[in-house]
Image: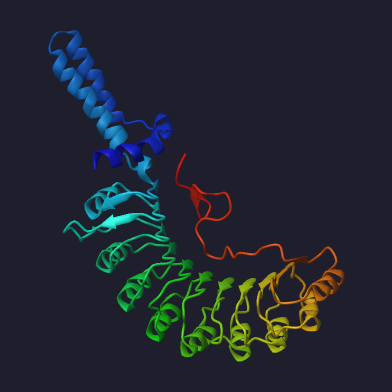
Amino acid sequence: MMHLEWELRQQQVTRSKRLTSVNNENILVQAKEYYLSGLLDLGDYQKDCALFVTNTFTYHSILWRRVDMSYKHVDCEQLNSLLQRGTTTLKMYQTTVENMNFTYIEPCFLSHLDLTSSIISTELLVNLLNSCTSLRKLSLESIPLNYEIVEKVVCNEQLDTLDLAMCTGLTFECCQLLTNKLSLLRYLNISWTELSCESVQHLCETMPRCIEQLNISGQRYNLTDDNIQSLARRALRLRVLDISDAVLLADQSIISLRLHSRLLTHLSASRCYLLTSSALITLKLLPAFSTLDIFGTLGQIQLQQLHNEFGTRIHLNNFPFSNIARPTTGIQRTSIWGLRTRL
């Protein structure tokens, strides 16, 4: 545990110059005066110095507000100890968390939590989420889920960003919880989650009206033109949408988006083989539309025709991967959702 704390403190050490502690400084000044006057021996003076350093550098909340624990092996007790120091932004990418017969986590102040690809037991994950009531942004990407976990997630009703890409275990009941409770959700990634037809339909019909960016790609045969029509009519603020790898989608989906999603700026429809260039060209009629990604959807000749029609205003096939709701993108390996977690 001491080794872990030492590593984490190194990430924060350059911030220490901004910290002052009037009470502790007064103690040191008085201790120094007593020592010089012969009223305090050297050992006691050194202890006061050590106490000042410990209180200032080890437990001061400013040092622990943003922490990167990626790739580390920690136990639940260490995690709980960290969170009690006032951490609000925590990156735990590919972190392994061991139970060690200690599963209770005290209430914490987390607002940004990245658990992407973490190895953590269901019991411990439930306890961790149960300690969080102020989450604004959360990533559980590639983590097995169940109803109890989702139930804890939606207790954070102010959540505006949720990344569930490649998660398993999302049932129809889980989808009901998500759309019923998270009314402030603006960025949602629910790609490649093996949703049922019923779940996809429910999401498209009950999606929070304030949603701005949605990744629902990878649903293969379960995402239909009717679903897109329902989504477009409901989510009028939608600006970025990824519907890639939905092999049943045809031109009717593009028509629905053009008619209802007037704020749409970016559409990804890669490997949607039934879409035609004649329908995609009409997206230029949307006033704010600027980016279309359709990798593997059209042939080279049709792509060139699209490029000629779009001109320089609309970019074609610039982004093979989606960044929607994901905590870390591009070269920003030390940040989550734009907040730095490591110096």
- Residue 217, x across and y down, in percent: 57, 76
Q: Quadrant of the N terminus?
A: top left
x and y, in percent, of residue 146 in the image? 33, 76
Q: Which scheme is used to colour this image of the protein?
A: rainbow
Residue displayed at 22% across by 13% down? 33
70 vs 226: above or below: above
Residue 108 visible from this viewpoint: no
Residue 322 falls left or right of residue 190: right
The answer to whether residue 191 is seen in the rendering is yes
Question: On the rendered structure, is 313 left or right of 332?
Answer: right
Comparing 45 with 249, the one in front is: 249
Residue, x 50% and y 74% (percent of image)? 190
Quarter-wise, where is residue 266 in the image?
Answer: bottom right
Q: Which residue is drawn at the image coordinates 62% and 84% (left, top)?
A: 247
Tell which of 251 and 49 is nearer to you: 251
Count of numbered tags = 0
Residue located farthest toward the top when viewing the structure as drawn: 37
Q: In the image, is residue 264 above or below residue 136? A: below
Give me the residue at 43% from left, 81% from top: 175
Can you give x and y, in whole percent of width and height, for residue 294 in the image?
70, 72
Residue 229, by quadrant, is: bottom right
